[in-house]
Amino acid sequence: MNLESVKKQRGLPFIEKGMRVELAYGSTKKQGVIKGGNLSGNIDVLFDGEKRPANCHPTWAMKYYGKDGNVIAEYGE
C-alpha cells in the first residue's frame, strides 16, 4: 500500500512524504520523517538517528508538523 492509499483509508489527506512527525507515548518521544505507507495501512517513519523506518499507526500518539514547524494535527494514545 502506498502513502496515497493510507491517506484515503485513514482519512488523513494532509500527510506527505518527508513530513516531520513526533511519536509521543508515556515518557517516550521520538521525532522523524514520513518515508511512505505500508501494507498494514500505516506509515513508515524514519526516526532521527535510526537507519530503518518504523511501522507507525498514523493516529496513535502521533503529532504532525507543517513546513512552518507548527503542529497541524495531533492524536493521543
Image: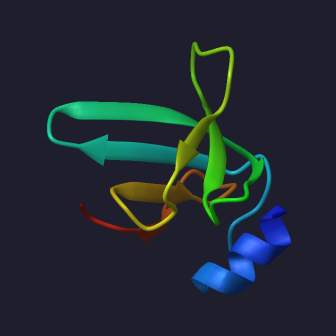
Residue 12 visible in the displayed image = no
Left or right: residue 63 compared with residue 24: right
Going 41% across and 32% down the picture, which residue do you hit? 30
Can you say whether 22 is above or below 41 in the image? above
Going 25% across and 32% down the picture, which residue do you hit? 28
Left or right: residue 6 compared with residue 56: right
Residue 67 x, y percent position in the rendering: 69, 55
- The quadrant of the image that shows the N terminus is bottom right
Residue 16 x, y percent position in the rendering: 76, 61
Going 69% across and 51% down the picture, which residue do you hit? 19
Q: How many marks?
A: 0
Can you say whether 28 is above or below 75 in the image? above
Residue 32 x, y percent position in the rendering: 58, 35
Left or right: residue 75 compared with residue 4: left
Q: How is the image coloured?
A: rainbow
Residue 37 visible in the displayed image = yes
- The quadrant of the image that shows the C terminus is bottom left
Quarter of the image for residue 7 reads bottom right
Left or right: residue 27 compared with residue 42: left
Residue 15 x, y percent position in the rendering: 69, 67
Task: Give the residue at the far left of this rendering.
Answer: 26
Can you say whether 73 is above or below 19 in the image? below
